[in-house]
Image (cartoon, rainbow, N blue to C red):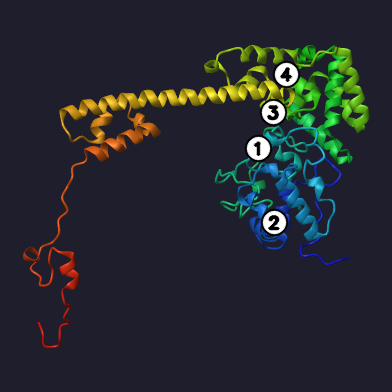
């Protein structure tokens, strides 16, 4: 076995739902080397990568990272690959949701602060489960206790890789997490059961890609007769379902959960990894059965109706997508010509509206300055603000330039004063600069006063 820089530490709970998370593995590895998790990530992973590639400077700060490090982001892949190279292990990918995030968007499903089960952290080898990093996972699957996200003694919360974070002790006060438990037990909800099902599939070595997710939604839509009946039954907007079926976006965990609850038999499609060709044939055949018209003709018709409005009444792409129940990315991918026309026209309208507003404000300030000039040549900015309906008008760029020009024009000319030899009382200092430069300089001797 080749020697490695870090210990050959194995992740706990492998090949089960109770698998260890990546952030917990980093904490245990740092504790084994008697360093903080922040020092371990920054000095052994980030600094060598930044020396090799300057673009790594755009990566994350370990002490501010959240539980999303257990996903499949660029930071997660960097940490996993770096730790595998330093420890010599090849199975650290099971500590993240890398096998699921290709099919489901989990970015907003992760917690910001750490959560734990007090009874689980009383074990001989305490560690955080990968499931605890999801916000929908509120109940411990073993003890039935609600997860805690704050210390029972000091009440503080901390991030997963804070500098003094340890597996089972509060980094703020040092109190053990297993000391404070709750007597009440609860039952898991549907979202947690769906997340548990995903963990079971991942523990079996299944890799869920986007085609598998599309296949699940297509099967659910075909079983009920189309997207609109599926939308009415599951509570998902037809536009979002169309975007998922067409492959433009990935369903988030909430959308995936609603479809799985409405059609439990559709979740069985995820028990086998369908080839991309089979999925494409199924999706194409299902689209052919729906007709030759596009899947979302309502969005296209609404967008054409919006483009007939005047430029001043055009909505933004974000607001239009929100009203249709979809995303701006899907609009740009499905309707690039119409979306580009909407963006160009709205941008031009916003610029014209801004220039017209600044012209009106400039005219108002100019008339106010003329009225003040009639009363007297001297005025202050405070007097000008008192005459305007809003003091924030002076922050406009065009208004600032007008006020600055009036201030320079109406400023009184103060004659420059030069010190004279009579007032200064010192020899050799005159009002003429030439004489001042020509005046001899005599050093004082030891007998001079």
Q: Which quadrant is home to the C terminus?
A: bottom left
Q: Position of residue 40 (x, y in %)?
A: 68, 59
**Residue at (15, 64) in percent of width and height:** 432
For the residue labelled by badge 1, is the local secondary structure a helix, a strand or a loop? loop
Q: Which residue is identified by label 3?
A: 329
Of label 2 and label 4, which has the lower sequence position? 2
Q: Give the distance between the C-alpha atoms of the residues marked 1 and 3, in whole angstroms.
A: 44 Å
Q: Give the distance between the C-alpha atoms of the residues marked 3 and 2, in whole angstroms.
A: 30 Å
Q: Position of residue 398 (x, y in %)?
A: 38, 32
Of label 4 and label 1, which has the lower sequence position? 1
Q: Mark 2: few, some, or many residues within 10 Å (few <14, many ≥20)?
A: few
Q: Which residue is identified by label 2?
A: 53
For the residue labelled by badge 4, is the local secondary structure a helix, a strand or a loop? helix
Q: Position of residue 125 (x, y in %)?
A: 76, 52
The tally of labels here is: 4
User: Looking at this view, is 353 or 75 the one in front?
Assistant: 353
Q: Give the distance between the C-alpha atoms of the residues marked 4 and 3, in whole angstroms.
A: 12 Å
Q: Of tags 2 and 4, which is closer to the observer?
A: 2
Of label 3 and label 2, which has the lower sequence position? 2
Q: Which residue is identified by label 1?
A: 182
For the residue labelled by badge 3, is the local secondary structure a helix, a strand or a loop? helix
Judge left or right: residue 371 versus residue 212: left
Q: Which quadrant is home to the N terminus?
A: bottom right
Q: Mark 4: few, some, or many residues within 10 Å (few <14, many ≥20)?
A: many
């Amino acid at each position: 076995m080749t020697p490695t820089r870090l210990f050959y530490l194995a992740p706990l709970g492998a090949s089960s739902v109770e698998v260890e998370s990546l952030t917990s593995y980093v904490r245990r590895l740092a504790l084994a080397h008697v360093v903080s998790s922040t020092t371990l990530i920054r000095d052994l992973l980030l600094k060598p990568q930044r020396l090799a590639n300057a673009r790594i400077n755009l990566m994350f700060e370990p002490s501010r990272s959240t539980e999303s490090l257990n996903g499949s982001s660029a930071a997660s892949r960097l940490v996993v690959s770096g730790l595998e190279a330093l420890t010599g292990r090849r199975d650290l990918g099971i500590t993240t949701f890398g096998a699921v995030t290709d099919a489901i968007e989990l970015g907003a499903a992760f917690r910001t602060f750490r959560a734990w089960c007090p009874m689980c952290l009383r074990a001989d080898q305490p560690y955080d489960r990968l499931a605890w990093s999801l916000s929908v996972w509120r109940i411990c699957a073993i003890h039935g206790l609600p997860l805690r996200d704050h210390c029972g003694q000091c009440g503080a919360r901390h991030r997963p890789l804070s500098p003094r974070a340890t597996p089972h002790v509060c980094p703020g006060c040092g109190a053990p997490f297993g000391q404070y438990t709750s007597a009440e037990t609860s039952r898991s909800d549907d979202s947690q059961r769906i997340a548990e099902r995903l963990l079971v599939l991942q523990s079996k070595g299944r890799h869920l890609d986007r085609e598998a997710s599309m296949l699940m939604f297509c099967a659910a839509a075909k079983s009920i007769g189309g997207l609109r009946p599926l939308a009415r039954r599951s509570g998902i907007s037809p536009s979002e379902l169309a975007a998922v079926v067409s492959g433009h976006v990935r369903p988030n965990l909430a959308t995936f959960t609603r479809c799985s609850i409405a059609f439990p038999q559709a979740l069985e499609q995820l028990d086998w990894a369908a080839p991309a060709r089979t999925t494409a044939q199924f999706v194409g055949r299902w689209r052919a059965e729906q007709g030759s018209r596009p899947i979302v003709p309502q969005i296209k018709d609404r967008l054409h109706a919006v483009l007939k409005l005047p430029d001043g009444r055009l909505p933004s792409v974000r607001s239009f997508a929100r009203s249709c129940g979809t995303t701006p990315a899907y609009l740009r991918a499905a309707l690039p010509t119409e979306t580009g026309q909407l963006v160009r026209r709205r941008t031009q309208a916003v610029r014209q509206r801004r220039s017209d507003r600044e012209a009106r404000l400039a005219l108002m300030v100019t008339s106010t300055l003329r009225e003040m000039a009639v009363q007297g040549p001297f005025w202050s900015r405070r007097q000008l603000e008192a005459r305007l309906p809003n003091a924030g008008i002076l922050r406009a760029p065009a208004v600032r330039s007008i006020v600055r020009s009036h201030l320079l024009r109406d400023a009184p000319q103060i004659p420059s004063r030069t010190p004279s030899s009579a007032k200064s009382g010192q020899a050799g200092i005159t009002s003429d600069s030439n004489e001042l430069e020509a005046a001899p300089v005599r050093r004082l001797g030891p007998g001079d006063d």
